[in-house]
């Protein structure tokens, strides 16, 4: 059968089936179940009107239950069974085995690193791009170029960046951009400036930024009248957690300044970037940041355009400089949008799989939870531990989903 004819028949059957379902279900409801005649006509009409919405919603509810709810329940069941024992119930044994594996904790550690770096970098770059492209004549072209990676699949982007990180043996011509740049350094002044001084300055700036975050998080708690600052116990707890996390990150950054300045770098030797532990995670993150920056830019650009001009004009009249206008006028007004973009990218990060699978396959300490789950399910054929790791991913995603839905409903009200 010709594919076009097959598609046409499929459309006719699908549309006809939907129309037939709604027509006959309505017919049965009004004619046989609750007929609008006889001494109970009024009561039947009321009952039919109560049942009708659920009758029409049934196909959608059934499909959602089949494709969303059932897999969750089945995954939970499989996580409590053992395939090698014929699917016997083993309780939490798979979870115990999972938390006892170093690879699981490596995946958890890397996922946390991804969660810290990727949403922050993507949102910051997207905000910066949105602000700058709105001020230049060729901003539309720049936005198109920045947004273009969104049209590329994760695997396609990984292939592109594998070429960027490509390594050939010493003495051969390097086709990888990163190695070509690296070999240009020979230990001279620019090598010191670019490879030691600049990273050290960035680390110091990051440590200062973390101090500022701590200040912003703790100042409302230190004020006497916290009730007027919107402080509740939950908010106070969140502020303390944020301050503690910022303090830890600031400590790590400041502790790394001296090693960065004194590290011995192998000048003149091509590097296999994806095999360098710890740093290779950042090389993988660059791919996702490259893709997600366009998404963040589009959303934040629309939010920036929605800021009332009166507030900006008032700030200019009061003598505010461009930095004050951006950080104290614009950013607070679009903070809700920034948080939504941040959490949306966070959800993407928690599900990241394709990039790691295509570039390192979880080797050289780059394992993440989704790739760990794939390894267990389809390579080790261990559905118990694989399903347990899937449940862990779902539990990590669930609070962010609930929070996003809560905020969306709050915005609608």
Image (spheres, rainbow, N blue to C red):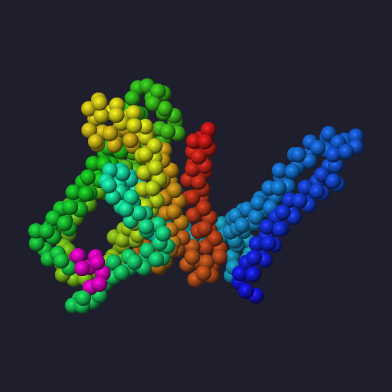
Q: Which residue is drawn at 29% across and 66% down?
A: 164
The residue range painted magenta reads 174-182
To which quarter of the image does residue 304 belong? top left
State the image coordinates of residue 342 (x, y, percent, origin top left).
40, 46
Q: Where is residue 61 in the image (x, y as percent from the top left)?
A: 66, 50
Quarter the N terminus occupies: bottom right
Q: Residue at x 32, y 53 (%)?
A: 141
- Position above or below: 198 against 208: below
* Majority SS type along the magenta span: helix
Question: From this viewpoint, is residue 155 visible?
Answer: yes
Q: Where is residue 167 in the image (x, y as percent from the top left)?
A: 26, 72
Depth order, front residue of 93/404: 404
* 374 displayed left or right of 269: right
Instruction: Name the residue located 36 percent from the left edge and 48 percent from the top edge.
Output: 297
> Going by the picture, which residue comes out furthest to the left?
189
Residue found at the very far right of the displayed protein:
39
Work out whether residue 255 or residue 330 is closer to the camera in this orientation and state it: 330
- 94 vs 40, nearest the viewer: 40
Q: In this view, does 164 lie to the left or right of 171?
A: right
In the rendered image, residue 178 lying in the magenta stretch gets the answer yes
The x, y position of residue 287, in whole percent, is 35, 59
Q: In which quarter of the image is residue 21?
A: bottom right
Observer able to see residue 121: no
Residue under the image location 41 percent in, 59 percent down: 151
Find residue 349 and report its image quarter.
Answer: bottom left
Q: Which residue lies furthest to the top in this view?
A: 225
């Amino acid at each position: 059968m010709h594919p076009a004819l097959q598609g046409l028949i499929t459309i006719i059957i699908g549309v006809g089936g939907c129309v037939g379902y709604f027509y006959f279900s309505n017919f049965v409801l009004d004619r046989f179940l609750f007929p609008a005649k006889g001494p109970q006509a009024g009561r039947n009409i009321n009952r039919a009107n109560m049942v009708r919405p659920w009758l029409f919603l049934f196909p959608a509810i059934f499909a959602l239950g089949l494709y969303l709810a059932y897999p969750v329940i089945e995954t939970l069941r499989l996580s409590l069974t053992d395939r090698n024992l014929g699917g016997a119930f083993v309780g939490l044994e798979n979870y115990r085995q999972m938390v006892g594996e170093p690879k699981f904790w490596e995946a958890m550690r890397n996922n946390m690193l991804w969660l810290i770096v990727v949403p922050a970098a993507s949102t910051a770059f997207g905000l910066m791009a949105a602000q700058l492209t709105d001020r230049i004549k060729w901003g539309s072209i720049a936005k198109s170029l920045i947004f273009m990676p969104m049209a590329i699949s994760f695997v396609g982007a990984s292939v592109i960046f594998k070429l960027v990180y490509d390594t050939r043996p010493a003495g051969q011509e390097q086709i990888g951009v990163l190695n070509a740049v690296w070999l240009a350094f020979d230990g001279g002044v620019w090598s010191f400036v670019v490879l030691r001084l600049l990273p050290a300055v960035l680390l110091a700036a990051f440590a200062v930024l973390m101090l500022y975050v701590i200040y912003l998080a703790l100042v409302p708690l230190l004020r006497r009248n916290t009730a007027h600052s919107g402080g509740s116990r939950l908010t106070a707890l969140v502020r303390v957690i944020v301050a503690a996390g910022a303090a830890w990150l600031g400590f790590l950054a400041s502790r790394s300044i001296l090693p960065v300045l004194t590290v011995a770098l192998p000048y003149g030797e091509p590097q296999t970037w994806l095999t360098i532990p710890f740093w290779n995670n950042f090389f993988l993150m660059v791919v996702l940041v490259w893709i997600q920056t366009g998404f963040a830019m589009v959303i934040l650009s629309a939010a920036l355009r929605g800021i009332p001009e009166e507030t900006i004009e008032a700030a200019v009249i009061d003598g505010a400089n461009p930095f004050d206008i951006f950080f104290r006028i614009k950013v607070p007004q679009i903070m809700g949008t920034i948080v939504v973009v941040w959490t949306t990218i966070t959800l993407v990060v928690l599900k990241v799989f394709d990039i790691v699978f295509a570039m390192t396959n979880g080797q050289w300490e780059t394992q993440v939870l989704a790739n760990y789950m794939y390894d267990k399910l389809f390579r080790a054929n261990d559905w118990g531990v694989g399903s347990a790791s899937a449940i862990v991913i779902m539990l990590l995603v669930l609070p962010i989903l609930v929070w996003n839905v809560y905020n969306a409903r709050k915005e609608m009200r």
